[in-house]
Amino acid sequence: MIVADASPLIVFAKLQRLRLLNDLYGEVLIGPAVKAETIDAGKAVHALGVEQLEAALEGGWLQTVRLTAQERGLMQRLTRRSRLDRGEAESIALASVRGLRLIVDDKEGRSMATVVGVEYVGTVGAVLEAYLRQCLDLGEMETTLRDLGQLLWLSPAVVAEVLRLAREAKT
């Protein structure tokens, strides 16, 4: 089980690879703000991949959860003390209080996750995990990274390191 911020969900859905999150982590939890940002706003603009997010919700492996009072309190503190948006703060709070890992790409989101002791992975890290757990073969991983680079700026050094780690793991 993992908590997801909006950006990785949107990216995996646009890449037609959302199912990888289910394959890797089983259940994926999101809060109401992330649902509003990804599914509700996505439906309003007919965003690419929003149908995958809806299907994941209907399938039950993507779940919108209500925040507890403790989670709401942490979310509010995070938004007051940082430049995080509501969805990022909500995701960090959910992961922190529930003791779960977080998938997040935003630099400040990662920094705040570290501050509150939340383990996280980014989209690129999840793609590498998918390869290492044999959810993707090397060619599929390389294609996914290439396609991801069309949606997000990826540091060439990060891509090279991921490919190196993947090739080392193969031997």
Image (cartoon, rainbow, N blue to C red):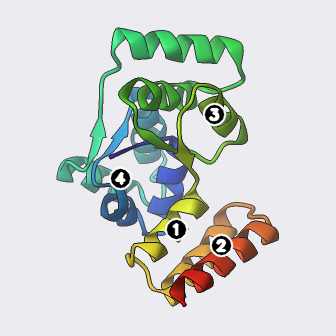
Q: Residue furthest left?
A: 59
The disc placed on residue 53 is 4
Between marks 3 and 4 in the image, the one whose residue lies nearer the viewer: 3
**Label 3, label 2: how far apart the Cα atoms are:** 21 Å
Dots 1, 2 in contact, CB < 8 A = yes
Rendered location of residue 68, percent (x, y): 33, 15
**Label 3, label 1: how far apart the Cα atoms are:** 21 Å
Residue at figure coordinates x 56%, y 58% from the top left = 123
Query: Callout 2: 10 Å neighbours few (<14), some, many (20+)?
Result: many
**Label 4, label 1: how far apart the Cα atoms are:** 18 Å
Rendered location of residue 36, percent (x, y): 43, 33
Work out whether mark 3 precedes mark 1 in sequence or the reverse, and give the earlier one.
Answer: 3
Residue at figure coordinates x 58%, y 79% from the top left = 166
**Label 4, label 2: how far apart the Cα atoms are:** 27 Å
Kind of element beneath mark 1: helix
Kind of element beneath mark 3: helix
Work out whether mark 1 precedes mark 2 in sequence or the reverse, and give the earlier one.
Answer: 1
Q: Residue furthest front?
A: 171
